[in-house]
Image (tube, rainbow, N blue to C red):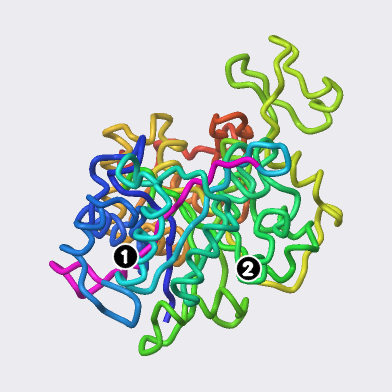
């Protein structure tokens, strides 16, 4: 049975996150998106932990369900921790995803962090002065079945390979704990082919998650597993990741990495957007204000890579998608949060079942029965990678065009708009 899993999200207790990020809304949106397994996020926050214990009931081994509707959507206990510390004469800022199999493990992790004077009440993604290696040791000493996964591994400011705050290798970051790091999260600004350029990551399983700060962003990246219905569990999901089981891990669902907000180098304030060669030519400085540019993911991958572009190993595959609201918005020419886009989206979900079914499963002929020719063409363009993107940089998301100029089908055909 296919399971689509988004294992890194946040709650309403995290900074700059929607107040709708509670279990009922996460459950509702997981069903709309077609997500079968979703992380809880933020289990270290006392208010959120109380909410989780009140709203989740045990289901498959190590997984949970919403008490008010235990018929669908599994929840996994997850959190993201922010480690800010000095190592090697440099300030390091590393974000880590923690996956836990039960509340007992969660309670012990919380107790261990509180013992080390970490303030867990200030933010759903707590900031601590502990090193990534120390956090990994704390987690694995408490429960070896838990997982520690570097979050959005290439983001410039807060990641294991970040150009401004990270390391050049996993070993530099995790030391003797590296042997227990089985996976990294690619993040929105990189995709598997970019990571395949590093032979050091050949044994590492690449996963993708939304890091959603609002319910509507659930599933913008995800993981697709094939697991027998009787075998779905926390341990089986972790085994698949740890063993890089290509029979069970079908593929990841990815942003087109250019759409990520740190793909290229740049300086947002001056609207400067550079490819690595341009950055090198300008000696890493913004040509407008002469301040250092934010070095993006493409540049950092190029720095660490030991393989050429296009290298393709035999490994877990991926599919690049654009979220359905963005596809609709690009077709109709208005913002993705507009009333018009929302109305079309809701109509499509009602007719098509859920977002992933529409984006991944329905044939062109099936899509033609539920939406306009423009949107069918746009979805097919996304599936075949025929999109045009102005790449993101320095915190600015890239802009995706899913229809070429002049390709929109005019109103001689019936429109639902």
Q: Magenta segment: does it hold 68? A: yes
Q: Identify residue for label 2.
A: 205
| Mark 1 neighbour class, 10 Å CA radius: few under 14, some 14 to 19, many 20 or more | few
The x and y percentages for residue 74 are: 31, 71
Secondary structure, magenta segment, majority class: strand
- Please tell me the numbered disc located at residue 107: 1
Seen in the picture, residue 398 relative to 134 is either above or below; the reply is: above
Q: Quadrant of residue 317?
A: bottom right
Asked if residue 172 lies left or right of residue 211, the reply is right
| Mark 2 neighbour class, 10 Å CA radius: few under 14, some 14 to 19, many 20 or more | many
The x and y percentages for residue 380 are: 53, 54
Q: Quadrant of the C terminus?
A: top left
The residue shown at (36%, 66%) is 108
Q: Marks 2/1: CA distance?
A: 28 Å
- Residue sitting nearer the eye, 110 or 197: 110
The x and y percentages for residue 379 are: 49, 52
Which label sits in the foreground, 2 or 1?
1
- Residue sitting nearer the eye, 67 or 358: 67
The residue shown at (74%, 68%) is 202
Q: Quadrant of the N terminus?
A: bottom left
SS of the residue under disc 1: helix
The residue shown at (50%, 48%) is 322
The x and y percentages for residue 369 are: 35, 59
For marks 2 and 1 on the same chain, the one whose residue lies earlier in the sequence: 1
Segment tinted magenta in the rendering: 65-86
SS of the residue under disc 2: strand
Asked if residue 57 lies left or right of residue 85, the reply is left
- Please tell me the numbered disc located at residue 291: none
Residue 367 visible to an observer of this rendering? no
Q: Quadrant of residue 60?
A: bottom left
Name, please, the residue furthest toward the bottom.
Answer: 230
The residue shown at (35%, 69%) is 36
């Amino acid at each position: 049975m296919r399971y689509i899993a988004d294992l890194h999200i946040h709650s309403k207790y995290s900074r700059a996150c929607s107040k709708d990020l509670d279990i009922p809304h996460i459950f509702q949106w997981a069903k709309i998106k077609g997500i079968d397994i979703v992380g809880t996020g933020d289990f270290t926050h006392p208010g959120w932990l109380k909410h989780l214990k009140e709203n989740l009931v045990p289901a498959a081994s190590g997984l949970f369900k919403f008490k008010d509707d235990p018929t669908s959507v599994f929840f996994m206990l997850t959190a993201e921790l922010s480690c800010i510390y000095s190592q090697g004469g440099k300030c390091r800022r590393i974000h880590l995803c923690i996956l836990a199999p039960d509340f007992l493990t969660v309670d012990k992790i919380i107790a261990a962090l509180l013992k080390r004077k970490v303030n867990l009440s200030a933010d759903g993604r707590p900031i601590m002065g502990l090193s990534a290696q120390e956090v990994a040791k704390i987690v694995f000493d408490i429960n070896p079945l838990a997982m520690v996964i570097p979050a959005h591994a290439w983001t410039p400011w807060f990641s294991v390979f970040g150009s401004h705050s990270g390391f050049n290798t996993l070993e530099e970051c995790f030391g003797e704990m590296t042997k227990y790091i089985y996976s990294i999260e690619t993040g929105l600004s990189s995709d598997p082919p970019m990571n395949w350029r590093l032979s050091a990551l050949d044994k590492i399983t690449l996963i993708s998650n939304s890091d959603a700060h609002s319910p509507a962003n659930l599933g913008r990246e995800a993981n697709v597993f094939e697991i027998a219905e009787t075998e779905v569990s926390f341990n089986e999901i972790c085994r698949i990741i740890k063993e890089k089981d290509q029979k069970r891990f079908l593929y990841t669902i990815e942003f087109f990495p250019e759409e990520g907000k740190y793909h290229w180098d740049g300086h947002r304030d001056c609207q400067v957007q550079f490819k690595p060669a341009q950055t090198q030519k300008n000696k890493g400085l913004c040509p407008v204000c002469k301040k250092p540019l934010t070095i993006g993911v493409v540049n950092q991958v190029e720095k660490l890579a030991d393989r050429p572009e296009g290298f393709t190993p035999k490994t877990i595959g991926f599919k690049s998608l654009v979220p359905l609201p963005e596809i609709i918005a690009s077709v109709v020419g208005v913002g993705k949060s507009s009333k018009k886009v929302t109305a079309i989206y809701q109509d499509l979900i009602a007719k098509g079942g859920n977002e992933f079914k529409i984006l991944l499963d329905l044939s062109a002929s099936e899509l033609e029965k539920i939406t306009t020719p423009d949107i069918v063409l746009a979805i097919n363009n996304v599936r075949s990678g025929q999109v045009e993107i102005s790449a993101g940089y320095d915190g600015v998301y890239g802009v995706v065009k899913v229809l070429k100029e002049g390709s929109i089908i005019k109103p001689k055909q019936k429109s639902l708009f």
